[in-house]
Amino acid sequence: MADRAKGGRRGDAGGAGGAGGDAPRPRESAPRAVAARVLARVWGSDAFASAALDAELRRAPALDPRDVGLATELVYGVLRAQGALEARIAELAAKGRWTSDPLVRAHVLMGAYSLCFLDRVPPFAAVSEAVDGAQSAGGPRVGAFANAVLRRLAAAVEAGGRPPLADAVVTSAPGWLRGALRRSLGRAAAEAFLSAGPVPPPTGLCLAPGEDRGAWLEALRAAAPSAIFEAGRVSPRAIVARGAGDLRRLPGFGAAWIGQEEGAQALALALGARPGERVLDACAGRGNKSWLLSRAVLPGGAVDAADLYPAKLSQLRAALSAPPASSEGAGAGGGDAQAGDAQGGGAEGGAPERAAAFVRETYAVDWTVGAGDVPEGYDRVLVDAPCSGVGTLRRRPEIALRREADDLPRLADLQVAIARRAATRVRDGGRLVFAVCSVLREECEAVAARLASPADDDLGVRLEPAPFDAELARELAAGGDAFRLLPHVHGTDGYFAAMFVVRR
């Protein structure tokens, strides 16, 4: 049914002719050519799929929304189901040398993904397009190989039916990760977590305090009628968007709201910052949580931001003397800003340059060595610690390919060291929230337990688990001192947060 020699429409990769002839290079704007370049960058240069896809789509402005959707699905689908797809091809191929060239590998796996999981792509087209792309990347012999293997796969799918995508995603996860998730969540929840959608997730928008979410939903829908805007399920400040494109072009960006994943908003809100308090964002990155916290402490309070990397704080420092961006309700302008990831990339995408206007000081500090110039006496400290990032698998499927089981103990030690040192900056009786974008017990409950245990260091602080005192976090934790956010339960990325009172 998928024999290229029997005709059928020419694939959108731009190829022509049989596997034995010279095929032209796929058109640069074709969705499969775009997706192949993204996958090659992910495999060849450790790029993040979301950022690489966003960059490629910006270079192909002529792609219509359907082609953008296809390129996106092929990138995320191949990365999530990669192990299962490669195993299926290995059953049909005598040699595995096709995997040595990233572009060839991308086209073959996209063809296999289309045959197995894309109802809207006819089998003959899936084979033809993959062969054209593989031949363009690797030559006629590679094209002939792809043609033969994918025809066999097409026949097998026709005879046995399409396999469930969820099963392929689960089995493609590394064995160590499946085991760690089962220990942390239970077998059924682990599988639900791995197969959770939508993929990629929607982009999150975070409203400043006092903004009317209903009014902003109306304003954003009017400004971008082809996009979808909905109220978030967890954060009262969240609006989730699909198909919104460049956030900078929407009304209110950088003034009334910023781009921030909904679960990340919940972590900042869980700190419970109040007007008049001094707050430290100890691992601030580009400052999105700092922006949210800075609004919570007004009037009279102050937020400082610290991070290991000075480059991440430079954007904040540059704008420290700028007047705060003002918001006049739905429709307020946003000013200059850094665009968020239009494809639903990083959980902290879209940090505006003016965010720093609300941050008093920034500190470049390596918490594992010392506290640097960070002063003492904060009422609250948020430690959003470096971690495996497993909670963001929907958004960053390549993480599963790059992490190893041996990473977890090293990361846990790092998290403990950072949190304990940051706790020395908290006043007696002040509060610290430890948070990670992971759902693995080794980085969650196990680290929280270590923080609560007596330490053999000479830092002079004790961390006592305590119930959250912010309403949102109390609900999520059911009155306890820790909570998880899960994509298949809450619709957010995966997170863990625990509250402590610091004693001296």
Image: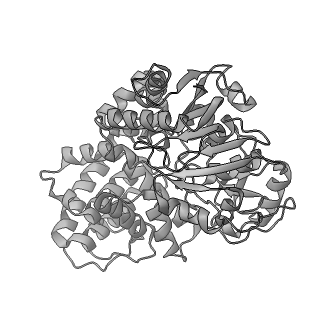
How many labels, in total?
0
**Snapshot colouring:** one colour
Q: Is residue 72 left or right of residue 235?
A: left
Measuring from the top left, give residue 123's x and y in whole percent.
Answer: 38, 56
Measuring 83% from the left and 64% from the top, which residue is drawn there?
331
Measuring 48% from the left and 25% from the top, which residue is drawn there?
451
Measuring from the top left, give residue 147's x and y in whole percent.
Answer: 24, 61
Measuring 83% from the left and 56% from the top, which residue is drawn there?
218
Measuring from the top left, give residue 295's x and y in whole percent.
Answer: 75, 50
Measuring from the top left, give residue 166's x and y in whole percent.
Answer: 44, 37
Quick check: can you spot residue 70? no
Quadrant showing the C terminus? top right
**Outermost residue toward the left in this view:** 94
Which of the pair 63/176 is nearer the observer? 176
Q: Is residue 249 above or below residue 476?
A: below
Query: For residue 168, what is the image quadrant?
Result: top left
Q: Is residue 165 above or below residue 428?
A: below
Q: Is residue 327 left or right of residue 354?
A: right
Which of the pair 171/442 is nearer the observer? 442
Quick check: can you spot residue 176? yes
Which of the pair 415/222 is nearer the observer? 415
Quadrant showing the N terminus? bottom left
Which of the pair 457/465 is nearer the observer? 457
